[in-house]
Amino acid sequence: MKVKKRMTKKVVTIGKEATITDAINLMKEHSIRHLPVVEEGELIGWVTESDIRGAYLASLIEQVSIGDIMINDPLTISPEANLEEAAELLYRHGIGGLPVVDNSKLVGVITVADIMAAFIEVMGILHESSRIDVILGGKSHAFENVSKIIRDHGSEIISVGMSAHQDRTKRVYYLRLAKCDVEPLAKAIEKAGYTVVSVTE
């Protein structure tokens, strides 16, 4: 999935001449924790809630602008990048959001919350579903065979996860399915020679 499919496109921005109070008010009004700093549509900086907190006391004493505290060369990502790449950058750098830039122009923002929402959607967690955990072993075409059994029982696979076991013959596949009666399905899968670890209605 591409970043452009999950990013926030209607981005709240701020100018470098704005005050700390301006930034605080924008963040409160829009319930956000990051502000891209732009000039004529181009990204020139990035300011976060923690940057604001750190500078707030100083701003009460002297005139401090967003340009004084912003990150001048922030990490960015392309709208064409994969969501996994964005997630890796956010995790590796311990940050909550990234400006999305295309040819120096700010086109969006992608946050940890956006990526979490995409994960929940892909995994089908919020949809009514069933689950069956299976060890497929080392047989060729095992996944295709189990998928066919599932379809033949009137269900479909919503998402697939798997354990990280190095021995492929012991790797568990976590199959989230469209809501179905899993007991007869589990029996059919076991009859076909696979090991059902657990089922969840």
Image (cartoon, rainbow, N blue to C red):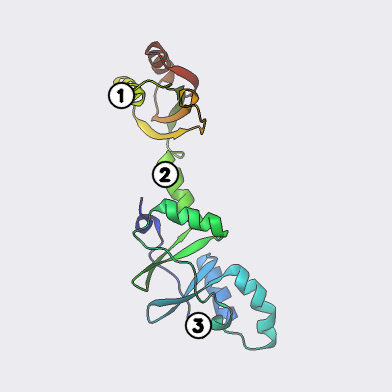
- Amino acid at the residue labelled 1: Arg
- Amino acid at the residue labelled 2: Glu
Q: Residue 37's spot in the image, x, y percent?
A: 47, 76
- Amino acid at the residue labelled 3: Lys
Q: CA distance from mark 2 to mark 1?
A: 21 Å
Residue reaching furthest to the top: 191
Q: Secondary structure at mark 2?
A: helix
The label shown at residue 191 is none
The label shown at residue 121 is 2
Q: Secondary structure at mark 3?
A: loop
Residue reaching furthest to the front: 167
Q: Residue 34's spot in the image, x, y percent?
A: 52, 68
* Sequence order check, earlier mark of 3 and 1: 3
> So how many labels did they put on this image?
3
Of marks 3 and 2, the one in the foreground: 3
Left of 136 or right of it: where is 152? left
Vertical side of 48 occupied by 41: above or below: below
